[in-house]
Image: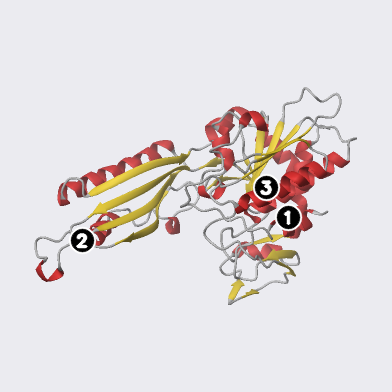
Amino acid sequence: MTVIDRFLNYISYDTQSDENSATFPSTQKQKVLGKALAGELQSIGLSDVRFDDCGYVYAALPATKGYENLPVLGFLAHMDTSPSASGANVRAKIVSYSGGVLELGNGMALDPAVFPSLESYRGQDLIVTDGSTLLGADDKAGVAEIMTAACYLAAHPEIPHGKIAVAFTPDEEVGAGMDHFSVEQFGAQFAYTVDGGELGEIEYENFNAAAATLCVHGLNIHPGSAKNKMKNAILMAQEWLSSLPPDETPAHTEGYEGFYHVTHIQGDETEAVVSLIIRDHDMEKFLARKAFLQELTEKENNIWGAGRFDLTLRDSYFNMKEKILPHMELIENAKAAMKKAGVEPRCLPIRGGTDGARLSFMGVPCPNLSTGGANFHGVHEYIPVRSMEKMVEVLLNLMRAD
């Protein structure tokens, strides 16, 4: 089975996670794919295969004789897809891209004027959606690439390698992928997540991240007699939001620039709830952003009355850079593996996070590698066939010890 066959099979499973769920995993349907992956790992010859109650899949490929003393190297990818767009009934198609605007269907198209990197794939086969769902390359492409590399290695015992650990995780997209992960069961000393974007990307710097929830408690009075009495929670929330720096949003930032991002707002005159996320690569700036929101909340309470604004902050993950810097051989090895496969490596900061960021703080340094895909979390998602095939080659180069 090729990496493309596997990928097209995996995206037929609806594994969308749910950020509002109180369960783990957040959706039980993720476990359907997990069970299938565990069965596949057993069938291709991996050992110590485990599918646990939380939906995690673990497996290992024992070291070839004479290479048992090498550090155990792990590879991870997540099974869930983003809540931002439907992952049910994905109708993928493989198209030959000849340039220009590529019509997907359902009124959607890939336009190089909007997605400039598209033109670099002129003449290649692309796997795309029909414009009604996301594709699922984030991160079923990573799952397929790891599975295919592990399968090849298991079928070719003459290739020398140390012990290889494999894990597939649920709920990465809602920030919970490492909540119940067993480092002991995984058994790796070092690892890579295969959860990045376009071919050649290597990432070992990510955002420091926090989530914020603002509850605004108003006072509702009949509008006919509300003068000097009503405290409209919607307008109070709007006042708080208007104090956020307008040029520090995702739409106005790039590279290492941090931001505040309002993700949801609902309410009425009595109560309004605002959800937002805070991101910054620099820890001092990250802490300053959180402090700014707390100061802003205190300021509004001084204006409207104590307790009218209630802010809750929750850290999500931190920049793995400090955990990777003492082990830069991981980055150099990844670069060498890509160059050997004819891929030009590019080290980029992640404007987001991965399971590997949290795993790095759990004692397993874990940078991130490309999957080859683009435009994740939406209907314009696509992945070149060649990129997936090259990533399998890259992973094999990392796994082998010769």
Q: Quarter of the image containing the C terminus?
A: top right
Please state which of residues 185 and 136 is positioned toward the viewer in this rendering.
185
Please state the horizontal and vertical placement of residue 12, each as a whole percent of the image: 69, 60
The residue labelled by disc 2 is 232
Quarter of the image for the N terminus: give it. Answer: bottom right
Residue labelled with disc 1: 387
Residue 124 numbered tag: none
| Percent coordinates x, y for residue 55 in the rendering | 62, 44
Instruction: Measure the alpha-carbon separation of dots 2 and 1.
Output: 53 Å
Q: Nearer the viewer, residue 157 or 241?
A: 157
Residue drawn at (65%, 56%) of the image: 137
Residue 132 visible (yes or no): yes
Q: Residue at x 44, y 46 (%)?
A: 279
Q: Which residue is mark 3?
A: 34
Q: Tell me which amino acid carries mark 3.
A: Gly
User: Closer to the camera, 52 or 168?
Assistant: 52
Residue 374 figure quarter: bottom right
Residue type beneath disc 2: Asn
